[in-house]
Amino acid sequence: MKQAIAVRFEENGKEEYFDPAGLDAKAGDYVVADTAKGARCGQVTRAAGPTADYLLPNPLRPLLRMADSVDIRRARQRQNEDKRAWRICRECIDRHGLEMKLIKVEYAPDHSKVTFYFTADGRVDFRDLVKDLAGAFHMRIELRQVGVRDETKMIGGLGLCGQPFCCSRYLRSFHPVSIRMAKEQGLSLNPTKISGACGRLMCCLAYEQDAYEYLNSILPMVGSTVRTPEGTGTVVEVNPISSYLRVRLAGEEGAVLMKYFKASQCRYISGGKRAPRRPDPDDDYSGLRDPAPVVAEGAPEE
């Protein structure tokens, strides 16, 4: 973990992390930071402190200095200019009848160009739109089409968990997410329950995937035959987090019993079972799995 300070450059924008560079800036102070787009003035949202490495960009850029009244006035003026540019562009889009949705407007720090981000279902012929915008702003115009995930990242909001979107809070890039991850984790395959505000599968499905793959690899699959303290039965449900198995047992006079057993109480006999996967040495699954894994019938225990 490194010492880093969190700064926000837009009213509801994403927090970015910087090297304090010896500045004693507290939450609410304004600072000038060295960003990839040049020196920018922003407001400190969290004072310098130990920060997890996965949150930090590489390289970690430094703060340049504390902001003065001129820097603060220019930053607020820039925010007003962004809102004005958004309104003008929206009017131009409506006038030309273009099928595109304007998402965000961003001026370059030196006001050499203005970038308009938008989404559209297909290709858009915006040549006339660019001419109108160039005549209105008298600077270089750039229109950039983005996907629905980038749209959600720029706008922000709250997820099903009640927390701000991961993409707008700290994710620097999008990881591939597949429906197989939802199946591996035993989640409902209802799209409304596993999709985010962007309409795509939730990014958080990938967070615990490695843990589920490892835990499922050391447990018998549904349909396996196992020996329990109360007799031989068939696994009908597996909970990899608690390491409990729901087993169907044959009772007296043909009765069927459903009982739960800890995986360590059962011995695998036959049926579906995956090859054990070697755990990642950087991950700690000690609190997620039973200390005694399921072993095959007759095989020596480790």
Image: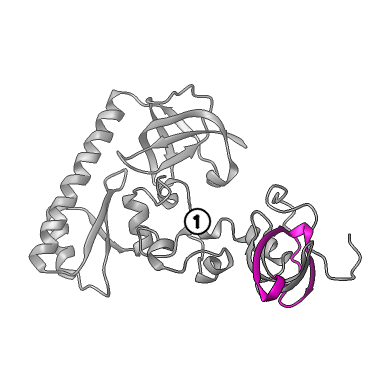
Query: Where 67 sits versus 230, above or below?
Result: above
273 left or right, relative to 65:
right
Residue 173 within the segment the image draws in magenta:
no
Residue 277 within the segment the image draws in magenta:
yes
Judging from the image, what secondary structure is the residue with disc 1 in? helix
Q: Residue at x 73, y 71 (%)?
A: 233
Task: Give the quadrant of the N terminus.
Answer: top right
Taking depth in this image into account, of 283 and 8 the one nearest to the observer is: 283
Q: Position of residue 194 (x, y in %)?
A: 44, 62
Give the image quarter of residue 60. top right
Give the image quarter of residue 35. top left
Q: Position of residue 170 (x, y in %)?
A: 47, 47
Q: Residue at x 34, y 48 (%)?
A: 157
Taking depth in this image into account, of 76 and 113 the one nearest to the observer is: 76
Name the image colouring: one colour
Q: How many marks?
A: 1
Q: Residue at x 37, y 59 (%)?
A: 150
Taking depth in this image into account, of 226 and 76 the one nearest to the observer is: 226
Query: Where 59 sits versus 239, above or below?
Result: above
183 left or right, relative to 27:
right
Q: Residue at x 22, y 46 (%)?
A: 82
Q: Position of residue 26 (x, y in %)?
A: 44, 23
67 left or right, relative to 182:
left
Where are the magenta residues, as a range? 250-278
300 left or right, relative to 44:
right
Give the image quarter of residue 59. top right
Task: Give the quadrant of the C terminus.
Answer: bottom right
Disc 1 marks which residue? 204
